[in-house]
Structures are given as C-alpha cells and as structure tokens.
Amino acid sequence: MSQTRFTPFLYRRSIAYFSMEIGLRSEIPTYSGGLGVLAGDTLRSAADLELPLVGVTLISRQGYFHQALDSEGHQIETPESWDPIQWCTPLRAKISVPIEGRDVWVQAWLHTLEGGSGYLVPVLLLDTDLEENAPQDRRITDRLYGGDEIYRLTQEIVLGIGGVRILRALGFEINTYHMNEGHSALLALELLWESPRSRRNHAVPDLSHDIARVRDLCLFTTHTPVESGHDQFDYAQVERLLGDYLDLSVVRSLAGEEHLNMTQLALSLSGYVNGVAKSHAEISRRLYPGYRVHAVTNGIHPRTWAAPSLQHLYDHHLPNWRHEPELLVRADQIPDDEIWAAHREAKRVLIEHVSQISGTHFDADLPIIGFARRITAYKRPYLLFHDPQRLWEIAEKHPFQLLMAGKAHPHDEPGKELLQSLFRICNSAGIHCRWAYLPNYDMAQALLMVSGSDLWLNTPKRPLEASGTSGMKAALNGVPNLSIVDGWWVEGCIEDVTGWAIGTPEIPDLDRADADSLYRKLDARVLPLYHDDRTGWIRIMKGAISKNASYFNSLRMMRRYATEAYIR
C-alpha cells in the first residue's frame, strides 16, 4: 500500500517544505526544539489533509546532542547517533553541490508520514556521508546546529541548493517552495540561477523578470525576532565556499551589503511572507519595513500531542476530533469526573516517569507546575525564582511541585550557567516544594509533561516569544497556562477561562514587575483554586480545551497555508 500511495508524488505538482530540522519522532533526533517539532506537525497535518507536500531536511546522523546533567546542573553533551536504516529507505538518486571548488555528493533517505486516511507525505533527509566524498565533506550532515559558521554554511548549501537538485533528480514537479526559517534560503538562489539569462557569462544586466518568477514560487515563514536566530555569513566565507556559483553583486543586492543575511535573502525572493502569530507578524513588519508580513498563527498536531487517556475521552464524546479538532469546542459538555479521571491517568504516567528518571517521588494530590524550554536568557527560566523566599512562602501556604526540563545550546555558555543557577536555588536549604529536572528533553518526554502537569508555565521576555507551541500542547490536554502575554498567548489567553496572564503589555517588561505578577497570580488565584475548588479548576481545564485546543491546532494552520499561501 505504501508504494502505491507514494508513487503519484513523483509525477504530480507538489509543494516542497524545507526546514533545517524536522521532528519526525523521538527515535529520530533530527530536531532541537520548537522549530523542528512545528515542522513535523506541519507535515503530519499535510498527510491528514492529503496536501501534496514533500519535506526536505538534513539527516543529522549525530542528532542535536544528548544531554546529561550532574547533581549541580552541569550539562554534559554527547552525540545522539541514530541509524537511518531503521526508519528510512535510501534512494538511489545522487546530486552534487559546489563547495570550495569541488563537487560534494548528496543522497537522500526517504521517511514517510501517514495521515489518518492512509495518505503518505514523503520526507527527504539529505546525506553527504558517501564514499565519493572527502572525509570532511562526509561529516557535513552529521550534527544539527553543530560546528562553526563555515560548517553551518556548508550545511545550508546542502539543504538549499542540494535540496532543489535532489527533488529534480527524483522527478518531483515543484510549483511552491516553502522555507521554514532562513536556513534554506539558498534554494531561492538556485531557482534564480536556473534561468539561462542568469548564467550567461555571469553578466546579468536585468534580473527583474527572473526575480519575479522566483517570488511566484517561494514563500517564507519567519519564526523569531531574536537576532541570533537569523544566520548571517561573511562574504569572504561565502566566496570561499561558493566561488563561481555566485554573482556577489547580485547576492548583495538581495541579501545585504555587509553580510549574506539569510533572512533578508528569503524576504527578497519570496512572494508570501508570514509570522507565526498575530503579535509576531506585527513585530516582523517593524523589523522588515517594506515587506508585507502576513500572520498565520502556529498550531500543534492533535493526534500526536493528546495523551492516550485524553484521546480515548475525545474519541468517546467528540468523534472525528482528530480530523476536525474544531469539535473540541464542545469539550465543555464532557462530564467533570471524566475530564478529571483522564487527566489523573496522564498525571500518573508522568509521576512514574519522573520517579524512574530522577528518583523524585511526586504526590498525585499536589499540583505539578511544568516548565520546559530551551534554557537561554530571553526565555527567563529564572523568573519563577526571582525572589526565592517569596516563592517558598507561597509553597508553604499552597503546596505545589515543580518539574522542569530543557537543553542549553552547546555554545550558549550563559545558558549553561543559568541551568546551574536553577539547580543551586532548587537544591538550597529551605525549599518547601518537591522539584525535579528531567534531562534530555525530547518529543516523548514533552508529551508526558504537557499532559501530566497541572499548570504550564512560560516566562519569556516580551516581545521575543514568536509563538510558543508547548502551551498549545498543554491546552489540548486540559492543562491551563500561566504565561507572559506574548506570542500565541496574546490570542489564546482569556483570564480565568483558559488560564492566566503574567504581566500586561502596557507595563514595561521588567523582571521585578513580571515576577511580582507571577507570584500574585500563584498566591491569590491559581493555587487556591486548585486546592479549594475542584469544580472551578475543571472549568478552567475545559476552557483550555474548548477555546484554545479547538483553534490552536496545525490542521487549522495548514488550511490557512493552503488557501492563502500555496494557492496564489
């Protein structure tokens, strides 16, 4: 059946979805966090909706990294190697890309994602670990976000230029190229250079027609206003690696005079540009004046991110919710005792996992506050501990348990120091709540945390949270959010209905003010409601499902992309 359903992709016009990372499943560590998981949810939803997408990414044979933590919070990083043959099929076609004047050969592996009706979406994982390549070139697709700028640029050459060429070699007829962040922006240059006029003696007097043609083919989704999230390369490095492939005068006119800015290149050569939430689109319009930036708010894949107990509950009361998650709007009609029982089962599974991994034994009758983010300064994992004494006083009055997870980027030394400071505070004498930190946060662990926690905490610095899909996953499982009003929560927060806001956009984004708001909400509203009013708490759980999960899902997101971006 798989071969029968896949073959038509080789002969039909398709949409190519390029992403440096794609979260296919926990056993395939080709993702580092939210960007990659969102990419996986995008393709899973395309399979559900039978949209003709093909994913293109890197094979990342050594993954992102495996995280271990010692008792003081020091992060120990080792490769997270995996064997593609266990999950993928090697394809015979090979192409080459130019790097430093030599041909680097690229082959693709095929992994398929199956939708609810059996429809298959192919994902191509590009690999340079081939006998034809020199030893240094065989390592190009080893590590996700590893190495230095030169290593990153070679990866982006393979992804962008190599991705277009492998699609051609495999017989795909692509009429739309969707760039998920700027890592793949070199694909637009490959499309531009395909024009005979672009190749004529490297003298291009007028590219206006060719640029218009490429813009008709390309769309670009930007995911972050954080500067470090936008790759920039020195032109000396670009010329060294790509040499005669590029006309630097043309590239500078498209990607910036000082550096090759991959975001600027994608903006210049895309006919449709979008941010990943309404507030993020507004910020992006200010960052990129002169460009029309649409808003397509992110969503999460319902079938992937609902715990088994919640899936069973929804199957019983809201048949077909997997394909029509808007049916979750009726979750407020599900009996309270059934909602609570489904959540208690998800919580039991999480507590067992925490015990096995950390040795910490959580109490099923006390609330668990969950926090799982990449550990970096702008996400402010420290905000909850801004005033430790005040936090412990709240815990004495309203007991709670704290569960945390997240990796610091291997090159982010301040992030690693933040991780150690969290351990110092939580291990200090006088703490009045159980706490645990789960190492090596991945998709499987994320599902346990977003479904088994009782409250989901998110504390980024405004306005740097573009979206924040972990909170959407929590809402799908009936777990209310307590979050800074940024990203998706600007649209999703209905105070005392779907969860609670920390701070307000009108007040300057200061740690002290936001921490004070967080403490006041925990002390006066959130924890007393959990301990003293079970009916009131379940009402918030139902609000999270019916008003958040029914909308912030990737099927709604993909229908938006299909009607507004893919069909233009």
Image: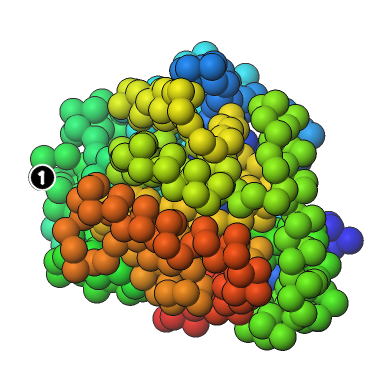
**Number of other residues with Cα within 10 Å of mark 1, as a class: few under 14, some 14 to 19, many 20 or more:** few
Residue at disc 1, secondary structure:
loop
As drawn, the residue found furthest toward the right would be 1
Point out the image quarter for the C terminus. Answer: bottom left
x and y percentages locating residue 246 in the rendered image = 26, 41
Q: Residue 466 is drawn in which quadrant? A: bottom left
Q: Residue at x 51, y 73 (%)?
A: 498
Residue 223 appears in the rendering? no
x and y percentages locating residue 1 in the rendered image = 89, 61
Of 111 and 456, the residue lying toward us: 456
In this view, 244 is above or below 359? below
x and y percentages locating residue 58 in the rendered image = 54, 39
As drawn, the residue found furthest toward the left would be 257
Residue 503 appears in the rendering? yes
Residue at the spot of label 1 = 257
In this view, 523 is above or below 151? below
Q: Residue at x 56, y 25 (%)?
A: 67
Of 19 and 510, the residue lying toward us: 510
In this picture, residue 99 sits left or right of residue 567: left
Tell me which amino acid carries mark 1: Glu
x and y percentages locating residue 179 in the rendered image = 42, 57
Of 406 and 273, the residue lying toward us: 406
In this picture, residue 181 sits left or right of residue 55: left
